[in-house]
């Protein structure tokens, strides 16, 4: 019989979690560490990365913190030169400027694309090279439900979130024979500092909760299971895929229930 008990075991694996200082990245780092990975907590906010790394070590896990701005190729290379070659990459950083397209400035467009699409590209390219020269690995990037469905003000963000999916699919096809798997996670609405602005507006926050089948937002810990699955051998036959963790948001196109009441 296959040994199913160890499917999620990450002992002796190194996981580079970029964006580990906050939100989904923070939960991902903690979860991967609890399943045995040595976690490199990377973030442009060095103090935040250090604090998550300390929390992991206080919990009995293995972690270190590194400062990293993933928009800078030299910094990505510098980090890869200092750490053990990663078996797992989790890339979470993303930014959104919510604004109608006809009001978007070139600077705002560049800011969103430079991190969400080009930043992901720079990071993934360097890590994928390392993985393909070593013993393979699993690359996990963050897309969004906005890769599929939009609302006013999401045009540029949605384009980047759609773009990373196709980029990761091409990568999966290119590196499958070198043992590198690449997948994307598309969350719905998750309570993190990124969405704090929405939480302050009860109408907006409530409307998003109602758009899900579960009628609520996710906690960051609820995304970690998908990260763990894709990081581990449990997903050894999963590559080039998109995993929606959205409380049912994208599965239903309306809120009217003809059988209610
Ligand atoms: N929160 C949501 O509701 C939601 C929904 C759908 C998709 N997503 C996506 O999930 C991902 C994670 O979102 P989150 O809510 O955890 O965000 P967050 O803002 O809480 O955390 C992002 C982290 O990335 C770091 N970071 C920002 N720029 C960086 C850079 N250049 N280099 C390195 N680190 C950098 C930040 O310091 C922060 O610690 C994003 O890509 C986001 O688009 C989030």
Image: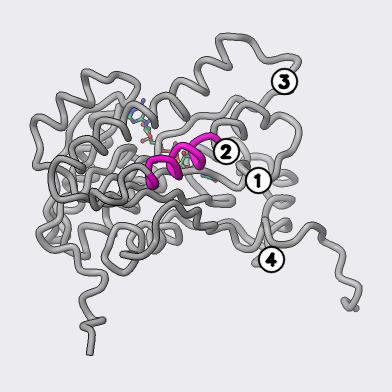
SS at mark 4 in the image: loop
Name the residue tied to disc 1: 148
Depth check: 105 or 60 in front? 105
Q: Is residue 253 left or right of residue 147?
A: right
Q: Which mark is residue 162?
A: 2
**Among the two numbered marks 3 and 1 on one chain, the one whose residue lies closer to the N terminus:** 3
Which is closer to the viewer, label 1 or label 4?
Answer: 1
Name the residue tied to disc 4: 213
Is there CB contact under 8 Å for labels 2 and 1? yes
Q: Where is residue 11, by image quadrant?
A: bottom left
Q: Is residue 89 above or below residue 127?
A: below
Identify which residue is drawn at 33% across, 61% down: 228
Name the residue tied to disc 3: 101
Q: Is residue 217 left or right of residue 25?
A: right
Which is closer to the viewer, label 3 or label 1?
Answer: 1
Real-space CA distance between mark 2 and mark 4, rounded to the nearest whole angstrom: 23 Å
Where residue 180 appears, x then y in whole percent? 27, 49
Which is closer to the viewer, label 3 or label 2?
Answer: 2
């Amino acid at each position: 019989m296959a040994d199913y008990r160890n499917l999620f075991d990450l002992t002796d694996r190194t996981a580079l979690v970029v964006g580990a200082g906050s939100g989904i990245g923070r939960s991902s780092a903690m979860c991967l560490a609890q399943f045995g990975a040595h976690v490199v907590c990377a973030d442009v906010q060095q103090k935040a990365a250090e604090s998550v790394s300390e929390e992991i070590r206080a919990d009995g896990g293995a972690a270190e913190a590194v400062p990293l701005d993933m928009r800078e190729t030299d910094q990505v290379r510098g980090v890869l030169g200092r750490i053990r070659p990663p078996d797992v990459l989790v890339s979470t950083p993303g930014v959104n400027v919510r604004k109608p397209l006809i009001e978007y400035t070139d600077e705002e467009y560049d800011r969103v694309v430079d991190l969400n699409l080009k930043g992901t590209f720079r990071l993934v390219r360097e890590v994928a090279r390392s993985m393909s020269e070593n013993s393979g690995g699993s690359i996990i990037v963050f897309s969004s439900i906005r890769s599929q469905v939009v609302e006013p003000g999401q045009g540029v963000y949605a384009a980047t979130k759609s773009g990373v999916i196709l980029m990761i699919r091409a990568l999966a096809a290119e590196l499958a024979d070198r043992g590198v798997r690449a997948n994307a996670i598309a969350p719905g609405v998750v309570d993190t500092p990124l969405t704090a602005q929405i939480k302050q507006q009860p109408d907006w926050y409530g409307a998003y909760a109602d758009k899900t089948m579960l009628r609520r937002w996710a906690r960051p810990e609820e995304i970690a299971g998908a990260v763990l699955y894709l990081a581990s051998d449990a997903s050894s036959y999963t590559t080039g895929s998109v995993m929606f963790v959205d409380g049912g948001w994208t599965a239903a196109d309306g809120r009217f229930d003809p059988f209610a009441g």
